[in-house]
Amino acid sequence: KAGVTQTPRYLIKTRGQQVTLSCSPISGHRSVSWYQQTPGQGLQFLFEYFSETQRNKGNFPGRFSGRQFSNSRSEMNVSTLELGDSALYLCASSPEEGGCIQYFGAGTRLSVL
Amino acid sequence: AQSVTQPDIHITVSEGASLELRCNYSYGATPYLFWYVQSPGQGLQLLLKYFSGDTLVQGIKGFEAEFKRSQSSFNLRKPSVHWSDAAEYFCAVGVTGGGNKLTFGTGTQLKVEL
């Protein structure tokens, strides 16, 4: 099976712009979670989608949003980008409704200038 | 809320030496426990997981971890480290009934001296 695929791998944006990141989960996985990784804050949970519904949400401002499509693919959107949004954004998919076993993609490196 | 502490930010070991990376968690019940490894510029690879049962779990690449409820710990071990093990290691906790949300520790950067 193919792994979790995230596109694009790298992005450069300027402050105030918005960005959309894409994640294709492992085939058959219905849960997709997003994490932000920065040197200062480490790995932080953004949100989880299961069967097109947001099931969990972390402590991030409303500028961070996501959605999941019927084929389980997910997108994450960040509006009005700030310098502090520069990070590695990781997507993970899970084969179960719970159990927390997650398989991660290689991430999207976002740089905000 | 659950939390994870990895007290060692950096660890250096010689190739062939044994390794132990520490992880302590805070949670009211028995959580799901995980160790992940991350190479530079890459995502996270699952090394092993603990849900219940035998407290010593085996993972990939020769790693093992032991769950100690009395110490709220889940330390990662490897008897003989290889140069290719140099990477960052993350301990994570998930909770029952909480969907698939993981709380991660701050990570331990492992350097292997040849």
Image (cartoon, coloured by chain):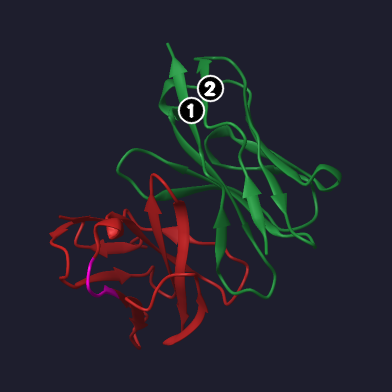
Above or below for A80 versus B72: below
Q: Is residue B80 left or right of residue A9?
A: right
Question: Element type at marker 1?
Answer: strand
Q: Colour of chain A?
A: red
Mark 1 — on which chain does it sit? B
Question: Element type at marker 2?
Answer: loop
The residue that appears at 74% across and 43% down in the rendered structure is: B73
Q: Is residue B28 left or right of residue B111?
A: right
Q: Are marks 2 and 1 in contact (CB under 8 Å)?
A: yes
- In the figure, residue B103 lies in which quadrant? bottom right
Task: Tell me, by letter, which chain the rendering colours green.
Answer: B
Residue type highlighted by circle 1 = Leu
Q: State the residue in front, A110 or B55.
A: A110
Q: Residue B19 in the image: x percent, y percent?
A: 61, 24
Q: Quickly name the residue at label 2.
A: B81
The residue that appears at 35% across and 58% down in the rendered structure is: A105
Residue B110: assigned label: 1
Residue type highlighted by circle 2 = Val
What are the residue bounds of the magenta stretch?
A77-81
Q: Residue A49 in the image: x percent, y percent?
A: 45, 79
User: Is residue B20 located in the magenta-colored stretch of the structure?
Assistant: no
Q: Main secondary structure of the magenta part?
A: loop
Q: Is residue B92 left or right of residue A91?
A: right
User: Could you tell me which quadrant the N terminus of chain B lies in?
Assistant: bottom right
The residue that appears at 17% across and 70% down in the rendered structure is: A16
- Whole-number angstrom distance, CA of label 2 to CA of label 1: 10 Å
Question: Which is more N-terminal, label 1 or label 2?
Answer: 2
Q: Is residue A108 left or right of residue A26?
A: left
